Structures are given as C-alpha cells and as structure tokens.
Image: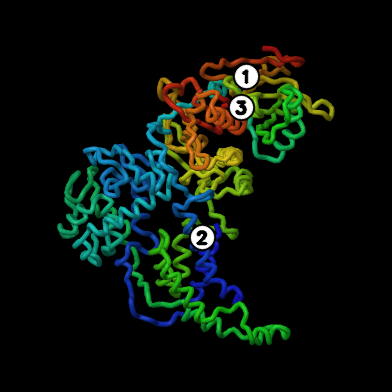
Amino acid sequence: MQTIKYAAFSAAILMASVAFMPAVSAQVVTEPENMSCGNADASAAIAGLESAGSGDLAALSKDGYIGRYQMGEEALLDQQLVIPDGNKFDNNFTWSQKAYSLYGIRSNADFFANEAAQEAIHKEYQRLNLGYLGSALNSVGQPLPCGGSMSQAALLAGSQLGHVKVKNYVNNGMKCVPGKGSPTNDGNGTCVEKFMCAVSGCKAIEKDMSKKTCDVTMPMIEGISCSNMPGSLRSFCSTYRPYLMTRAECQDAEEMAKAAPKGPHAERCENLSFGVGSGSWSFVLACSYASEAPADQDGHSEPKGPVTDPACIENLRGMGVQFDVLGQVYNGTASGKACYIENAVALTGTAVPFGSRLTMSCDMAIAVEKFGQQLKGMGVTGYITPSTTVPCRPMRDATGDKVGTVSEHGIGRAMDFMGVYVGGQQIHSRNIHNKGTAHGAFMSQIKSIACSTFRGVLSPEYPLYKGKYDHFHVEWGRGSFCR
Amino acid sequence: MAGYIKGFALALMVSGLAAGAALGQAEGPGSLWTLPSTGGDDYSVVDDIEFLSDIEFFVERGWTEPEWKTYEKLVEDVARELVVPDYVQRTGRDAPEHASIDIASAPITSAGFNNLLVASRLPGDCGPDGCLFQVWELQGETWRKVFEFTAIAFAYRDGVQEGTTDIAAVGGEDVPSRVYHWNGFTFSR
C-alpha cells in the first residue's frame, strides 16, 4: 500500500518538474522500439481482446485456452510449465514441478486464482516471442492497414496467435491470408492483424534515456534560500542546510536505483519518467513494482467493482491482513445463474500464508484469517494445497452436478486444503482417520476449530468424501454444518 | 516541500525494494510463499463435492431466510451478554475464547416486535445435523431464550392464522427438514 502512495507521490513531483527539463537529445528511444505502447502495452491489448475483453483470470475457452491471456498448452510447454503429453494442441494441462516451484500452480484452479503468476507467465511468453520474431522486427515503423504503424508492441500482440503467423503476415506484405487456420489466422479465422491493430494507435512519443532528474531537481534544491527561515533557524539552515539533498547524494541514489532489478512494470515506468518526466531511476524503480490499482489518499487501492459491505473491509483491514479490494467480481455463469463474488478481496498476507494470491469474498476472508490465527497458535506455518475460487460451476454431490445451484467455490465463499505444515512437517488431513495418534488428534483439533469458525465444514470424515477425498472444505455459505 | 526532497529519493528506493520483496516469491508469513511439494494426490477443487442444504427449496416457496450478520459490533455484544452466558449454563463448559455467532432479527413470537435470532458455532454447537439456532424474546427489559433447535439453516413465514408463525429447521442431504409452529403461546412440531 505504501508503495502505491510513494509512486503517486513521486510521479506528482516529477511531473511538476517537466517545465524545468533541459533540452537533451542523446540516446533517444522511440516508442515503436519498445514493448509498450504508451501505457497500454501488448499485454493490455491482448487482455482486452481475449475472453470478450473481460480480463477474467478464470476464463476457459471451449478449446481449452485458459486465463486472462488465454494461454495454450504449446505456449506453456515452451516455459516447461506443463509436462509434454504427446499432443501440444489439445490443451490438456499436466502442470510441472517448475510451475509449482515458481508460481505455486499444481492445477488449473491454482492458475485461475493466481493473477501475479498469469502476468509473469505472459510476460515471459512475450519475452520468448521477441526472440522468435527475428526478421519480422524489421517491419517496425511500416504502416498498418488499420492506421498507425507497426511497433514492437504490435508484433508481440500479434504473436498471441503464434510468432510464425506474425512472420507469415509480414512476409505476405502485411496482409492477412483469408480462412480459418490460414498462415496468418487462428482456427476461428482471426488474423494476427486484429491484435496488432489493438496497439497500433500508440503515439510515437520519445523517451530520452539521457535525462537526469538530479540536473532538474538539484538546482531547485540549491536555490532554496535560508533567508525565508525564521531568525532562530536561519543560521542553522545556512550552516547545515538540513533536510536538503546534496548533488552527490542525488546521483548516488539514482545510480543505485538504475542498477537495482526492476519490477514487472519497468518499461511502462521508463516511458513515464524518461518520456514526459525528468528521467528519474528512483521513480522507475518504485513505479515498476507498484500495483496498477489507483490509490486513494491513504494508499489503499481502489476496488474495480462496487463494495456493498465496507464494514467487512474495514474489519479485515483491522486484522492486519494484506489484501487488495476488488469489489464485486463477475465470475462467469453456470446453469443459467451468474456467479458474483461479493466484496471480493485478493489476499496476499495472512496469518498462515497460502503460497499464492487467493481471491474470496470479504466475509469468507475474515473467517479464514480468524481460523489462520488460531492455527498459527498451534504452530501451523502453511496450508497444503489451499484452493478457493474457481470458475462458476454448479454444486456437485456424489451423483454429479446439481442443476440450478452454484458452487460456493464459484462465488468466493469456500476454501479447500489438504492439511497443514507445522514447521517443515506435513500433517495431511487424512490423518483424521487415525484416531489415537498424535496427528489424528491434531487434525481432530483443526476440525473442531474449523467448525467453530466457519459456517460449513466438510472434513475427510464426511461420508461422501470417504474413499474419494481427503481434504477439508470450509465455507461461508447459507448452510451450517460440521461433518 | 524542500524538507521532503532529501528523503524522497531514498524513501522511494526503500519503498520500491520493499514492494519488490512483497510481490516476489519471498519466503515467510505475509508474503507470497511457494510451498514445498506435497506428493502425489490428484484431488482438484474443480471436482469438489459440497453439502447442499434445502434452504433454496423453502425460499422458493415463500419462506424468508434471515439476513444474518456476523461482523458488527452488536454481534459481539449479543455474544458477550446473552449467548456465551447461556452456553456456559447449558453445557457446563468454560466460555470459549472465540465466540463465532451470527445474529438476525425477525418477528416470530409477536407480530409487532422483532425477536433476536442467533446461529451459534460455539464449540460443540455444530455437528452432522447442523448448528444451533436460538430464538430470543425481549421480556420487559430482559432478553430470554424461548426456543432452540439444531438445523442446517433457518427460515420462517407467517402462519395461516393471525399471530402465528412457522419456523423451518431446514435440513439437507440426509438431514430431514422440520417445521415448528408458534401458535401464539408455544412452539410445537
């Protein structure tokens, strides 16, 4: 939260100094040569086109493409995130150990629930594509039929359908080849040009990497006169110049910031600072890690959807939990019923960490945190395979889908986990069957705590789980039960 | 303004690095933390089985589901003043450290005044047949418990005769639903 505030703060200061910017012309980088188009990069364009532009993290196409960027098996194989199964186009994903160790992903549900992972995976997909594009990069600057010109961002956007199709498009004189599955089109007949044009309207702004914010800010600082100070402080000010940065300190700070590894938004932030700003690496560093969510004056990110229970949000905030407020989140439909996660929050810091960023309703989040605080008191340090929200689907019982119902997992009011970690030791929930053992007693205690915290609890002792499942399902739904 | 400037660059750097750590795969509580492998188990939340209550059956037939509240100050007051003392008395156990209850209001025993409804998840109050629901009535200046039962969910509706009310102890799956009738003087099944 603090980061957002600082980023906004620094941006305001740096933008204010634009008027003092010296005219320097060396090392100018033009916009088409980087991966971003203004502040709308290729990723944003793709998210705006895929899944009807919903940006839905849990989007699942009929052909099996998944997530906000509709990743397919071939693309995930390229990053060794899934295991080869002999058919890289059927989109049957068997997630690899690398996916788990890098992003905590073991299932599609994990992928759907992990925004940070989806962003990182797509960034890497683009980085790889940049290498594959080869001579197609020579088309940068050429006019596109839809207006605007080809940019690196546009080429990357087109690579959503495969870099080979982008090369074909360029080699075909920047023209689509009609037909489904043609050299430039996907199986639906969509040409790479559609994705390219989504980012072709960017202005060819220039960013000047030779700008140095110290050249702008230091004259302002050095120009501050101690004569404006009250008499008692004037002498002190003149002698020690308190709170004022020296030119050397400014340059040291900038060198450190320039050398430091940047966050996921580095390029966009460079555009801001070295385009219209005064060229501050300190700004770029902070901005590159900052959340994209706009912040209020307290540094809290603003929700994307309406919040109907602000008291719950405040309550959660008072518990010391780290989270982003998402507001009402649409999560698809099932059996003709829409799934909305009311007062949704994305949890990042909880008493017992999840290992990924999990989204759920606020009231469920409070119950989860109360549960976690009690578990932490028992020495629990993590959940085994926690899962919360999945795309909208009907409830299931032993006979299958229950038509006309909606799963609590689809509306962010349920969590499953398969046991806990105590220190480095796994205690699997199946131990609840081992009555009379230490682990059995421990799991029974966890069940007891769950039943006095959540509205509904299904343990591995639930008759319909026996012989099939060994996990805990806890929920904040309309029913009260402890099984 | 000038006073901020010296600390500005360093503050930005510190905040930027801190944010980087928070957003990265750092180990420890309060951060994204990659858990070690759990070993083979093919369970997927996508196939999860859930418990289906019959509450929707009642709601579709005109019964009312109370609007339960959990995280309001009043809930804490009700727990402390009424529910926990009642729990100690009826179970003989110590007062629990965490009293998780829901409360709602609805006119059950008097058309003109709301009763206090409680859904209790205090230790031992929830089991395979559901959790404990209580109906409290204000008598003079004192709240008194007038009815309680165990169920998966709670619903109510006006009775056929004026001044009467029906309460549904809603079940689900292998737990049968029951209906209790308030005739103006007493509850009967």
The extreme front residue here reads: A437
Farthest residue to the left: give it. Answer: A172
The residue at which mark 3 appears reads as: B65
**Quadrant containing the C terminus of chain A in the rendered view:** top right
Mark 3, other Cα within 10 Å: few <14 / some 14–19 / many ≥20: some
Q: Which residue carries the number 1 mark?
A: B168
Indicate how the structure is coloured in the image.
rainbow
Type of amino acid under label 2: Ala
Have a look at marks 2 and 1 and say if they share a chain: yes
Q: Which mark's residue is nearer the viewer, 2 or 1?
A: 2
Q: Under tag 2, what secondary structure?
A: helix
Q: Can see residue A142? A: yes
Q: Position of residue A259 (x, y in %)?
A: 41, 69
Instruction: In the rendered structure, find residue A29 and report the number of the disc placed on it.
Output: none
How packed is label 1: few (under 14 Cα within 10 Å), some, or many (20 or more)? many
Q: Is there a contact, CB below 8 Å, between mark 2 and mark 1?
A: no
Q: Quadrant of residue A106?
A: top left
Give the residue number, with chain letter if any, for mark 2: B18
Q: Chain of mark 2?
A: B
- Answer above or below: position of A409 versus A228: above
The residues tagged by marks 2 and 3 sit, at their Cα atoms, a distance apart of 47 Å
Tell which of B61 and A187 is nearer to you.
A187
Residue at position x 75%, y 15% in the image? B186
Tell me: A106 left or right of A363: left
Q: Between disc 2 and disc 3, whose residue precedes?
A: 2
Packing grade of label 2 (10 A; few <14, some 14-19, many >=20) is some
Q: Residue at x 59, y 30 (%)?
A: A445
Q: Chain letter of disc 3?
A: B
